[in-house]
Image (cartoon, grey):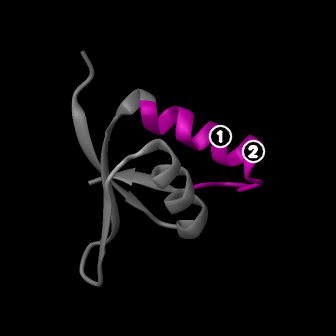
Amino acid sequence: MDEIKVWRVENARSKVAYVLMSDGVAFSFTPEEGFVFTAPDFYVERLILRLKTCYGVFHPVINEI
């Protein structure tokens, strides 16, 4: 089973928030940490692919904390 990790979104925050809400994934925003959510690696890989193909995000930047 994949390990759950913490991720930070660096760009396209509104589109990422929309997809996360659609998928029922909890996320938070603080001025110190920015836009943060938890998910396994495979979800983030699929999320990046969806953002590129379905939502027109040229280069989504989502980094593990």
Amino acid type at image mark 1: Arg
Q: Nearer the viewer, residue 1 or 64?
A: 1
Position of residue 25 in the picture relative to residue 50 (left or right): left
Give the CA separation, mark 2 to mark 1. Answer: 5 Å
Q: Quadrant of residue 18?
A: bottom right
Amino acid type at image mark 2: Cys
Furthest toward the top, the residue is 1
| Residue 54 among those drawn in magenta | yes
Q: Residues within 10 Å of mark 2 (few under 14, many from 20)?
A: few
Q: Position of residue 14 (x, y in %)?
A: 57, 69
Q: Position of residue 13 (x, y in %)?
A: 53, 68
Query: Where, quadrant-wise, is the N terminus in this rendering?
Result: top left
* The magenta segment: 43-60
**Is the C-beta separation of discs 2 and 1 under 8 Å?**
yes
Q: Is residue 33 above or below residue 15?
A: below
The secondary element bearing badge 2 is classed as: helix
Q: Which residue is pictured at 61% across the width and 61% down the height?
A: 15
Disc number placed over residue 50 in the picture, else none: 1
Q: Which residue is mark 2?
A: 54
Q: Position of residue 37 (x, y in %)?
A: 32, 54
Q: Quadrant of residue 42?
A: top left
Q: Which residue is pictured at 54% across the width and 58% down the height?
A: 16
Q: Which residue is pictured at 24% across the width and 41% down the height?
A: 5
Prevailing secondary structure of the magenta residues:
helix
